[in-house]
Image (cartoon, helix red, strand yellow):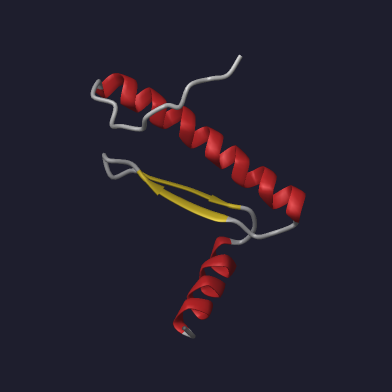
Amino acid sequence: MVRGKVQLRRIEDKSSRQVTFSKRRRGIMKKAAELSVLCDVDVAMIIFSNTGKLYEFCSSDCRYIYTTYLAIFSAL
């Protein structure tokens, strides 16, 4: 059984949109943690909700990851 292609569009119902955001946020953070462990890499993720809340994930010291990121992109 093959699933059809799902067209991505904004979820209009506010309650459903919040539930989807919460579930997908947890899922993507879990994937980031798995990527960090399986590939032995540093991962940092920052998510801002539409209400302005901050969600973050860091596989190791966040300051180290952020300073490394800034050093790499300031050199470009």
Looking at the image, residue 75 sits to the left or right of residue 36; the answer is left
Q: Provide residue 23's location: percent of width, then percent of height.
A: 47, 27
Q: Provide residue 48's location: percent of width, then percent of height.
A: 35, 47
Q: Provide residue 11's location: percent of width, then percent of height.
A: 29, 26
**Please, is residue 5 above or below residue 46 in the view?**
above
**Please, is residue 2 above or below residue 37 in the view?**
above
Q: Provide residue 4's location: percent of width, then percent of height.
A: 48, 21
Looking at the image, residue 14 sits to the left or right of residue 69; the answer is left
Residue at position x 47%, y 83% in the image? 76
Residue at position x 55%, y 34% in the image? 27
Q: Quarter of the image containing the N terminus?
A: top right
**Please, is residue 43 above or below residue 17 in the view?**
below
**Please, is residue 60 above or below residue 50 in the view?**
below
Residue at position x 63%, y 53% in the image? 59
Residue at position x 40%, y 26% in the image? 20
Residue projecting furthest to the top? 1
Looking at the image, residue 2 sits to the left or right of residue 12; the answer is right
